[in-house]
Image (spheres, coloured by chain):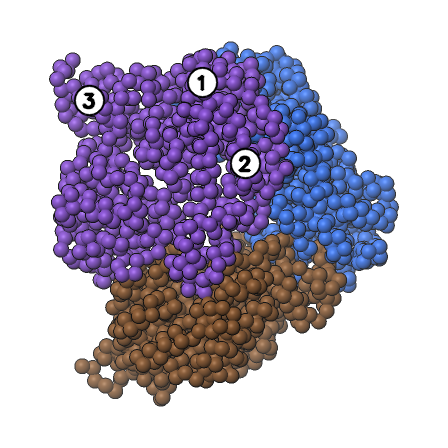
Chain colours: A blue, B brown, C purple
Amino acid sequence: MKKILLGANYYPEDWDENLIDFDIENMKKCHFNVVRIAEFAWKKMEPSENEYSFDWLHKVVDKMHEAGIGVILGTPTATPPSWLYKKHPDIAMLSPTGVRTSHGGRRHCCSSNPIYREYSRKIVERMAEEFGSDPGVIGWQIDNEIYHWEPGCCCSYCMDNFHAWLREKYGSVEAINSAWNLNLFSQAYDEIEDIPAPFNAWHNPHIKLEWNLSQSNNHKSFVHMQAEIIKAHSAAPVGTDTMPVNGFDYRELNAPLDVAQFNHYDTDLTRPAMWMDYMRNFSKIPFWNTETQACWNGSTSPGHSLMGEGFVYMNTWLPVMLGGGGNLYWLWRTHWAGHELMHGAVMDTSGRFTYANGEIVKAAREFEQLEDILCATKVKSDTALMFSSLNWNIHKSQQISNAIPDDTGFVNEFYQKLLGAGIHPAVIDGREPLDDYKLLITPSAYSLEEGNLKERITRFVENGGVWVVGPLSDIRTSIGTKYKNSPYGFLEELTGAQLSYIIPHDDGSITLANEQGEELKGRGIFELFDDGDFEPLLSVADGHSALVGKHASFVKKVGQGYVIFLGTLPEDRELGRIFSKASELACAEIYKVSDGAMITKREGDGRTLYIAAALKGKACEWRTDGSWRNLVSGELVSGSISLAPYEIAVLERADAERIE
Amino acid sequence: MKKILLGANYYPEDWDENLIDFDIENMKKCHFNVVRIAEFAWKKMEPSENEYSFDWLHKVVDKMHEAGIGVILGTPTATPPSWLYKKHPDIAMLSPTGVRTSHGGRRHCCSSNPIYREYSRKIVERMAEEFGSDPGVIGWQIDNEIYHWEPGCCCSYCMDNFHAWLREKYGSVEAINSAWNLNLFSQAYDEIEDIPAPFNAWHNPHIKLEWNLSQSNNHKSFVHMQAEIIKAHSAAPVGTDTMPVNGFDYRELNAPLDVAQFNHYDTDLTRPAMWMDYMRNFSKIPFWNTETQACWNGSTSPGHSLMGEGFVYMNTWLPVMLGGGGNLYWLWRTHWAGHELMHGAVMDTSGRFTYANGEIVKAAREFEQLEDILCATKVKSDTALMFSSLNWNIHKSQQISNAIPDDTGFVNEFYQKLLGAGIHPAVIDGREPLDDYKLLITPSAYSLEEGNLKERITRFVENGGVWVVGPLSDIRTSIGTKYKNSPYGFLEELTGAQLSYIIPHDDGSITLANEQGEELKGRGIFELFDDGDFEPLLSVADGHSALVGKHASFVKKVGQGYVIFLGTLPEDRELGRIFSKASELACAEIYKVSDGAMITKREGDGRTLYIAAALKGKACEWRTDGSWRNLVSGELVSGSISLAPYEIAVLERADAERIE
Amino acid sequence: MKKILLGANYYPEDWDENLIDFDIENMKKCHFNVVRIAEFAWKKMEPSENEYSFDWLHKVVDKMHEAGIGVILGTPTATPPSWLYKKHPDIAMLSPTGVRTSHGGRRHCCSSNPIYREYSRKIVERMAEEFGSDPGVIGWQIDNEIYHWEPGCCCSYCMDNFHAWLREKYGSVEAINSAWNLNLFSQAYDEIEDIPAPFNAWHNPHIKLEWNLSQSNNHKSFVHMQAEIIKAHSAAPVGTDTMPVNGFDYRELNAPLDVAQFNHYDTDLTRPAMWMDYMRNFSKIPFWNTETQACWNGSTSPGHSLMGEGFVYMNTWLPVMLGGGGNLYWLWRTHWAGHELMHGAVMDTSGRFTYANGEIVKAAREFEQLEDILCATKVKSDTALMFSSLNWNIHKSQQISNAIPDDTGFVNEFYQKLLGAGIHPAVIDGREPLDDYKLLITPSAYSLEEGNLKERITRFVENGGVWVVGPLSDIRTSIGTKYKNSPYGFLEELTGAQLSYIIPHDDGSITLANEQGEELKGRGIFELFDDGDFEPLLSVADGHSALVGKHASFVKKVGQGYVIFLGTLPEDRELGRIFSKASELACAEIYKVSDGAMITKREGDGRTLYIAAALKGKACEWRTDGSWRNLVSGELVSGSISLAPYEIAVLERADAERIE
């Protein structure tokens, strides 16, 4: 990567073609160097079957190229034209109650349907032939925000795929009956083909899990089919833009792709931060934030509105700060009609910049200023927070405690609290190697059966790593069932400790005490251990007498390393203390920050940078020492780094320099 | 009109026919002079196909007539008998998911269905023949509470009507594709017949708008068909009773009818007040309030309960005060079985008067006392608040700000705040003439393309009128799309001012200041203008720096008149100040009132009356001067008029009289 | 009954068969003497059509029997195997919108379907043949938690049954048209077969009532069919386990059965207490509490979590205290996979006891210690609270006041407040004899037409009984219609008093005063009487002037007894006062308790016991006198009985004994 991409999503098909010069002129004013186009323009490219029209698109790509603006080209498969829907109404998704989705929205067709696939293949191939070697095209986006919508499609092709998925995974109906415990409720099936979609009745968690995995798999293979076609014609990086929803497996999705593409419209930036830290792993080149609001979102009504000053600036920096290669706003110019009329944009319908333009240009200029060093360095962390699609799906198919609201379980909550404690973790999938890390944290990691984790974590710890076992970890097999011999897959075996009770609880009637005897509360779940050969960190001090004296957290030396078990979500202060202890035992990096600051570290070309950001829009500080050069302002600072709301400082050690 | 109608809705078909004398006797005790009957009695009139039975109904009409009680006769088309449903099950509405409405409720049949229409035509014709010249029948009600229920009917006839509606309005599918921007999402259709009902997918705002208009149109033509039949046989006034819901076009509905009929069960009387001020325009004779609660409503469960003392009295006066010709309670006697068993009435099932009978009789006596002067005068106002079905439908099909809860946008809120400021506005449709008014107020008037409004408003202002442009006005075409060259249709052109930003916002982080520098908050939306050749009224004093100094309200002289732009909903005190300023500039009438008072003016026969009402049930006053005769109490009052909770004073200038 | 049953529900079909010895060993540790098995194991018993497998089940029964653990055997008809569903998909329930329930849950088949019935008959017969004379089988459970699910099944068999039910009850369509007032809305039908299921439209309360009764009847006859088969082969008591939902008629359901079986997962124990007091009536032997949580429930997510110390102990005692013959926890061992994975149990998946094991064993030991005296005595009360399925169904089909949240109307609220006032009532169905009682209380007893109640209550009062007429009583016929001549069926006739108004109301604007002039509020409904020949207890002191001076409560001597009318729900203190007055007039037993205490009385074998329980988990007391022997602790106590949270004292008069 040679430069930071900054730009917007652009829909020239919706506007008079004469407007393009005006738009390019204004994009240049914004210092934009990329646009994403064509993602929904199938009808414009293929007005009727087998009649193609690409001149208009060539003209746009060429004009952009002339202006030095790269084009990310989207395949339009999310929006097949009405002539296709009319000829083959069965390509639309079928609801569990037998209703076909109507034409008029997007992503309404079934990724499993062979006719839809064939037409998709054709249009993608034609696009790839047309633009595969076009120098103006700097990347490809496949489809748009593909994932498994709830409840999914129940058409015959999806049912066939579901049954094939089950056969492939389990081998036989007997194996399924046995694995899912289908003696229960006399559910056992005689043939795999008898297994229904898990709707219109009270279904078990395992069929729901497999249904979701199977539906996701259909979409994944649809994307991969397109990637193969494009790659046959183009050397530009290929990806598919995704939103973090419904348990999609972003690792597998991105495996044969080049660039992870991420969309978000969050206003709590700690959430997309976690996702970007996660998506970074799956991208062969720095990932692209392909969509975020320039003002506010508004698909059917405004999801949010005017944000505090600096928010858009911070949001623009966010992907770059977290190792991404660029940011695109959705959208360049507010639609003048049709869907999402209420969505904010860089420019309004009549061609006037919207309120945050100053913030956009400020970020753009800083990217230009710092491009070389940003592109030459990569985000580094020696702490890893684990998250995986499998555990996300297990969490969604069975709710163990009512007090865990986040759709990823405790993962996002732990990420936020790690930032608060001064740790910027890598967020890694369970199938990723652990070698780069000193400290591993696994909250809500229901199953640790992915990628031989049991052996890998054991080795990690024995070789000196510190493993913080968050609540609800290692308690399920990979299909969401319980272990029969131990509440855990291997935790008891590894630590020699023994669980006494696991209790969903949230009314505050359990009081814990730490080693200093300070009392505190836990939240959501209590996994309590008997006394054992370990050092207790949190023990029940008051509550039901059967619980008093049991341990909700402990540390145990294992080999050269440590296991820190944490069986509840304690108050922030205490959680911070445990994170600090873990970090200390692991000799991992931890920053002394006040709330709201996020510190990320970058290395490359022999240089080490730290980007300090007032992520939450409040003034905060990083209590450090020595001298630093702030590459944004050019100023030298020393001692503590103070940040104004939404300020960003790109810092490099300057201890040899003299303070002016 | 010679008298004020007061009475109730009566269902003799549900009771022993011997009860009628008892009922009439008690109606007389209540001073009632009207009943509404027969609206749901199709089965009783036509027990089986082509066998008619009207004797029972003649008997009721005759008995009422003898007793001096006029009859409003309802056509029973809302409730076709089961033999018709059984013979033609396809007459029932079809849901978007393919489910037919079952027999057993009302308004379950499709107004587009030709078989249902034919049977409806026949029963209405027979009724008209029977009662067209009956002296006991003083009016007709067509069907009952007809409007476009969400989501509407998706049967083949409705789909045909929808396509015909689109063809009539747009001419061709190409015109629709272009007008709705159907390049977006590759939605463009090849034939109008391919356009689906806007369900079972994420559909655009324009198709939703047209669907609603088309569905309403089906009902409208069904009513008009009946009106034509009745008018061929009867000279009595014809109308159809309506509730203010779902964007129905009451102006077009009432165009060929004689008397607007309105039903309401509100307990916040400022809401039906607005509607009555609106319905008044569409009625050739004083409108009828055809339904309101005598106690509480209770269709499926009690919607509300015992109201404060005087509420029923005030609610009885409300239509009369606002220019209506009468009021009917729903219902005379609580049902003894069947639907709406929990609904209150004038009398309970066992024939005992309910708790508010004293209030009913008090209002009845005052109507008798004041009948001549009330009938001889008409409500007048020189201020007009604009409201139209088109803008109501645009509002419902696209939500621009989350902070505008009322289903009519800002309109009802402005109406209430105008009352609070001492202005009782006429409420006029956008297609009505502006000639009678000095001050025009248009909140949430998304589109000003109806009835040549651009030219008419321009002329109105140039000739000296004052136009208060409320928020969210002139920002959409008549099909809900945006203008491409300006955020406004003609506001910038008219004022020379230029919008900077339009921002949905509601967290209070924007502070405004008025000309005196007093700080205040706005709500819901901020339409902010650059500096211009106008006098600012409200400017951003604090908030995001891009906004500071922009203007949320300004006044601009245009020709002989003024445009007062108001781009937010400011705090009440400030809104009152702006209304006062506008009123002053317009030389329009404004009353000095404390909260809760509504003052309406009436003129006729060379006399001018004011009705002062403590509408909200709290003591309030009208600070006026001189001497007045209160025609209710007969007392002379002078100076300030004080009103007890729910008191009504009918006032005529008595400056020549001596205070006793 | 010779012993108190204590045990758990056990699913050996879900576990390795070698685990059974371990399980039995642990059951013995818990002092368990009963298990319930087989209820969902159809597939295991009949793996394919007509091939039966009972060896595994015999083995379990035999092992249990050897270990002294009795078996309650469940028929598996709630969960037909997939081969049956596959062969006859029409056996599944059909929704009102035409969707069949899928295989994969339970109770998804239609109890009316003749094919399902035939297969059910066969499997039950085979089970009865196999185990009818097995000494290890101590009882039978038919199906599981059968009742009328909302909205019910709309298949052709259910429709036929509905029409047959209507024909049987009303005789003719004319009778229905007349009884339901179907002149209203032109609903009247020409044939009974034209009457639809009451969905997909706005239907009247009477059709909803009959639909629910008819659906319940289908399930009832399905259970009775099974009972007949089992009884032909077995002398062990037969029942069906039920939950208190949806208006099911537990009296009729249990009529031909031997033992009422009740399941509950409540954490507010006053609710199941009421139900157990009710179910007791319908059981020929002491009823069984067949399911309750050993920890927490968790069908799809945890419904609740860790309870306060002693709760499980109290909950274990509850059925025994209220006359039941035993208690079974659901379930023995948490499932390792499949549905309800989150549900707590006596033992966790890996074979460790859960947190409340100490409480379970404590109760078990006390049952063993007190078995003889508990089995020899029966619960007695001279106060009866009336509750019936009919009124429950009327309440559910028409909501008269928004302020009555409980699904049984005021009944549960009155039960709780009676406990608070020191009265432990019997809870009797309207069809039960009144002879055993001195005080009768009937809140929300909409219809008093069951079992000749009018005559029976009249005789009860005339013979000296005291009848507290709670709000909303005697105001509906048995099909939910109103009386036309009086608001009441016979209350006015009996007392000579006359209702003025019945008003749904809940905003506190009505103030009442009692005879002492103390002011208080009522809630939910106000049934107000004119002055009459009675002693007023509560009268309107302030509010709407039409109401002031009317009476919301009065007492009237009738014959040798009294009628106490209560037309509102007054504040607790006042309600307690009225209950005390009623109890005093009736010479009925009342205990001086502080909040949280429940005192039940038992008689038998010439002995009288009182069980005092701190039911709500807070310390409380029973202010009594004399000396008592606490049979639990063996201690002598005198004067006031103090109870620690969740403590239970079994008390016998010991006045002759000397206090140690």
User: Could you give the CA–CA distance between mark 3 and mark 2, rounded to whole angstroms?
Assistant: 50 Å
Quadrant showing the C terminus of chain A:
top right
Above or below: residue A245 compared with residue A422: below
Horizontal and vertical percent for residue A430?
A: 66, 27
Q: Which residue is mark 3?
A: C606
Q: Residue at x 39, y 74 (%)?
A: B56
Of labels 2 and 1, the one closer to you = 2
Q: Which residue is mark 2?
A: C118
What chain does mark 3 sit on? Answer: C
Same chain for labels 1 and 3? Say yes or no: yes
A647 left or right of C635 in image: right
Q: Secondary structure at mark 3?
A: loop
Same chain for labels 2 and 1? Say yes or no: yes
Residue B189 or residue A490, whichever sits in front: B189
Q: Residue at x 41, y 66 (%)?
A: B264
Q: Which residue is mark 1?
A: C136
Q: Looking at the picture, which amino acid does disc 1 mark? A: Gly
What chain does mark 2 sit on? Answer: C
